[in-house]
Amino acid sequence: MYRRIVTIVLCSLLAACAAQEKPPRVVLVTPVPIEEVPEWRKSITPEDDARLDRLGEDWGKLHARLPARVRTAQGKLVDPGAGLDLPSLTPGSYRCRIVRLRTTPRGAASARSSTNDYCFVSATDEGVAFVKQTGSDPAAGYFYPDGKRYVFLGARQRRAGENSLGYGNEPARDMVGVVERVGGFRWRLAVAGADARQLDIYELTPVPADQQPRG
């Protein structure tokens, strides 16, 4: 009888302990994704990276110094805050007009436009390729996705239509800038100048394939 009572007491104590014991805590460890470095950052030089960082600020100062009539005439094309979402360009031929913003000796800013030349955008294994096919200041390079814009790394070519010089081959010819959509079927490529006093803006508007230059 005594043994039975002891056994019952022990069983009750063990049951009570088991009831009070907390279940083991399960900790889920979620790996933190490693942010992928944009492709253009793997190639850009520190000097051009600094120019790209300053582009918005320099552009804003030039825009503020433009005469009101020029800002009105050029509209969104020269407005640094006019970039829109969905910047992707369709491969094909584009008319490209260059607007050159420059600081005048008196501290104001001026805008000079070139005639319409032709540029070509194509999808390649390396990325979105850009070539200025006609006119002066021939350029070529690649557009790299970067949020609501593209980053442009390229070089001034020796002749129109060429793309033999890549970014970094001859640093003196390197070009860096951003590509944004500023309207329906209208884009701009803003190329940073050698300093804060100059900026080139390429207006890009698509043309039918049968109107692009041959050769």
Image: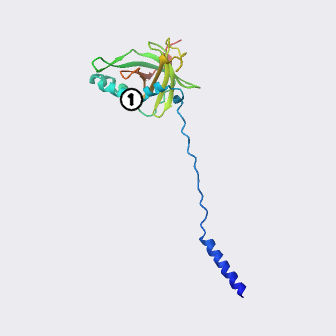
**Which residue does the image show at 40% across and 27% down from the upper left?**
55
Element under disc 1: helix
Residue 6, above or below 157: below
Q: Please tell me which residue lies in front, 71 or 200.
A: 200
> How many badges with numbers are in the image?
1
Residue 87, above or below 114: below
Give the residue type at disc 1.
Gly
Quadrant hosting residue 12? bottom right
Q: Is residue 19 left or right of residue 116?
A: right
**Which residue does the image show at 33% across and 27% down from the upper left?**
61
Residue under pointer 1: 56
Q: Please tell me which residue lies in front, 2 or 189.
A: 2
Locate the N terminus by quadrant.
bottom right
**Residue 199 place in picture, x, y as percent:** 38, 21
Q: Is residue 35 left or right of residue 200?
A: right
**Residue 202 place in picture, x, y as percent:** 42, 21
Is residue 139 visible from the viewing direction of this image? no
Residue 193, above or below 1: above
**Residue 109 place in picture, x, y as percent:** 31, 21
Q: Please tell me which residue lies in front, 158 or 210.
A: 158
Q: Please tell me which residue lies in front, 106 or 102.
A: 106
Q: Tell me, what colour scheme is on the image?
A: rainbow
Q: Is residue 108 left or right of residue 8?
A: left
Q: Residues within 10 Å of mark 1 (few under 14, many from 20)?
A: some
**Residue 176 place in picture, x, y as percent:** 46, 23
Is residue 162 visible from the viewing direction of this image? yes
Quadrant hosting residue 100? top left
- Extreme residue in the bottom direction: 1
